[in-house]
């Protein structure tokens, strides 16, 4: 199932466009660029992740599918039967690590679609529902575990007393609680040097920054931005992109520098892709969008 769509390098004047952005977008967007609708008609898009070549993978969670949007603009079905995958991220070996919340697990999906279950629970208890994740350079995995009731679950309340940020050490199947102070952690991303972790508390409307220790321990929790977010990502300047009502951008010092409206009710998640990692890819409810950037991603 493959069809040709807009190439990652093209911005069609006739494609769907958002209203004009504001703040310091001139330093972020490519000249004349606005968000371009690539395709619509999904149930709910989520979890975009980019591989080393610049191809982007994302989920349509209600339909239990992972799609690939390659760097030449072709959209194809990568996998059906994904454990209701939500947030995803590629590890250093090219495996797609997935928050598979049908059974509240963490999966590793190989390029040949072979599934390996990494996490099945925490200390004998079922996880709330892994939502988003980030893989560090050592192969350790930080992931958020909020509780969102799913219609396909056989339970109506969580097994755990809180909603935590977990860390899965390299080679382990037993996650540890990295932080228990947030109300409902959601989007998560770390800096390329592995020193800083950003986590969105979507219910408390805050973004926090943590220092990461050598064994994945978190310390020095600091309020970074007074707003919540769904998915989040970083560019090569260190700017943090927050999803929800369109995309809001903060510089490394915590100053809001841009807002990019998207013509959908909710922008769920975000990543950079393409050959030069300068195409911003947005999963927005029933649609996906791209916009060309001056800056590049660091995934």
Image (tube, rainbow, N blue to C red):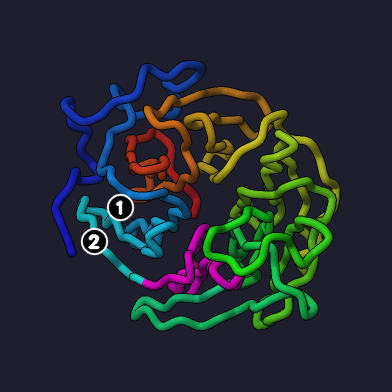
What range is drawn magenta here?
81-105
Q: For mark 2, what is the residue? A: 76
Q: For mark 1, what is the residue? A: 275
Confirm whether residue 210 shows in the render. yes
At mark 1, the secondary structure is: loop
At mark 2, the secondary structure is: strand
Q: Quadrant of the N terminus?
A: bottom left
Confirm whether residue 214 shows in the render. no
Does residue 130 sit above or below 209 in this rendering? Answer: below
Q: Residue at x 65, y 35 (%)?
A: 252
The quarter holding residue 249 reads: top right
Residue 143 percent location from the top left of the image: 65, 61
241 left or right, relative to 287: right
Q: Residue at x 79, y 61 (%)?
A: 178
Does residue 74 sit above or below 24 in this rendering? Answer: below
Mark nearer the N terminus (1 vs 2): 2
Number of marks drawn: 2
């Amino acid at each position: 199932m493959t069809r040709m769509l807009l190439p990652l390098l093209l911005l069609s004047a006739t494609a769907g466009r958002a209203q004009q952005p504001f703040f310091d977008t001139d330093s972020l967007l490519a000249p004349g660029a606005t968000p371009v609708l690539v395709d619509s008609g999904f149930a709910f898009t989520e979890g975009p992740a980019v591989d080393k070549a610049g191809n982007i993978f994302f989920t349509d969670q209600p339909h239990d599918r992972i799609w690939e949007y390659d760097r030449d603009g072709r959209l194809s079905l990568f996998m059906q039967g994904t454990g209701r995958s939500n947030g995803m991220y590629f590890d250093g070996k090219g495996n797609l690590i997935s928050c598979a919340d049908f059974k509240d697990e963490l999966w590793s999906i190989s390029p040949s679609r072979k599934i390996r279950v990494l996490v099945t629970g925490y200390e004998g208890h079922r996880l709330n529902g892994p939502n988003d994740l980030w893989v560090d350079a050592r192969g350790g995995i930080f992931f958020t575990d909020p509780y969102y009731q799913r219609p396909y679950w056989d339970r109506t309340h969580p097994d755990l007393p809180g909603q935590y940020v977990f860390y899965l050490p390299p080679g382990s199947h037993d996650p540890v609680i990295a932080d228990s102070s947030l109300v409902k952690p959601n989007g998560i991303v770390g800096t390329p040097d592995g020193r800083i972790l950003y986590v969105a508390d979507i219910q408390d409307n805050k973004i926090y920054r943590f220092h990461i220790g050598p064994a994945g321990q978190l310390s020095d929790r600091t309020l970074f931005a007074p707003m919540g977010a769904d998915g989040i990502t970083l560019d090569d300047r260190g700017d943090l992109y927050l999803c929800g009502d369109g995309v809001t951008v903060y510089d490394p010092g915590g100053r809001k520098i841009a807002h990019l409206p998207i013509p959908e009710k909710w922008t769920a998640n975000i990543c950079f892709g393409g050959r030069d990692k300068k195409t911003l890819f947005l999963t927005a409810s029933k649609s996906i969008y791209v916009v060309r950037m001056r800056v590049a991603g660091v995934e």
